[in-house]
Amino acid sequence: MARMKTGVFSWEDVLAQRYQNNKPAALSMPKRHNTLADPDHPEEEAPPPTELVTQPQCSLLSKLSPELRLLIWELVLGEKRIHIIQQSNRRMGHVVCPRNDACEICQGGRAPSPSKCRDNPDALLALSLTCKQIYCESIYQLYTLNVFEFSNTWSLTYLRPTIPSDLWDSIRDVELRWAFPGHWLPSKDPVKTVYFTAGRQQWIETCKALTGMKSLRAFTLQLSGNWFCEPVEKIPVFLEPLRHLKLQQEWMLQLPRQPYYVKEIGNIDGDLRKRGIDCLIRAG
């Protein structure tokens, strides 16, 4: 991040300092801190998911076959869109998207208050925290079968140190909504350059976290904001840190629905492919 200047504080310094100050605490061992847990109990004692745990005294677990149990866990935990949010005291949390027009986050609004998140009937870890065996059998499905959406430009890098590495590496589908000022792009203007370093560093850290996700299969980047109107030649420069993101299928780049970008999609696609950036481009 940018250095703090003694006695002189630029907007670049403020951004850099705020980014560092808002970072959540890293996962402490041996407890397994799970971001998706109840905000009042962020740390839960649980065995590693790879550790085999059986509870023959439980009628439900002993009478149902493993295949049927896994199917039940999948039906309960899968096919969701999970908004990752930052709550008070630097804690990370989540909101299950209702997938309709009532979702304030999808509409660009702010996340619900922590009390509403806590009372959400779709609290994701309620099933997994029932007992150790169900945790071991179901927790991976929570991370592999859902879409993780990040509406805040810092949330993805904030989430990484708060969950165990094996669970982080099992995430398969990520959506990122990135709203950034145009002056965060390279410029010959010395005034704009002051703002460039802080914003660029955050973006590079986000891209590094993405390219390091071992099980990632699908990724969507939405450049949001009606004011986003940068020249098309700057977009490949901004996306350069994603050049090493190689998935089984091309990732999706979604631009604002503006006539300028609709007309220039072909040129943008050509410039990106010349730089080795493989993605599908849509406007809107």
Image (cartoon, grey):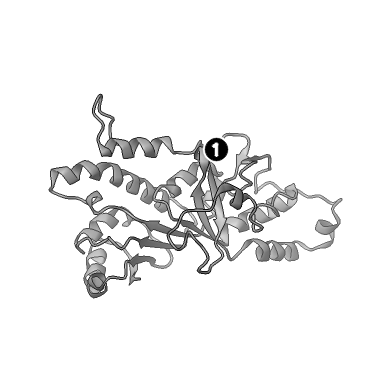
Q: In the rendered view, does 110 fall on the left or right side of 127?
A: left
Q: Residue at x 27, y 39 (%)?
A: 12
Q: Nearer the viewer, residue 61 or 95?
A: 95
Above/below status of 28 relative to 258: above
Q: In the rendered view, does 193 fall on the left or right side of 209?
A: left
In the rendered structure, which amino acid carries the disc numbered 1? Answer: Leu
Residue 166 position in % (x across, y down) = 56, 48
Q: Residue at x 36, y 56 (%)?
A: 178
Quadrant hosting residue 70: bottom right
Residue 246 position in % (x across, y down) = 38, 60
Which residue is label 1 attached to? 27
Q: Nearer the viewer, residue 114 or 126?
A: 114
Above/below status of 278 relative to 20: below
Residue 222 position in % (x across, y down) = 37, 62
Residue 91 position in % (x across, y down) = 53, 41
Q: Residue at x 60, y 52 (%)?
A: 116
Above/below status of 72 relative to 204: below
Q: Residue at x 24, y 45 (%)?
A: 196
Quadrant hosting residue 255: bottom left
Q: What secondary structure is found at the residue carrying circle 1?
A: loop
Work out which quarter of the rendered image holds the C terminus and state it. bottom left
Work out which quarter of the rendered image holds the N terminus and state it. top left
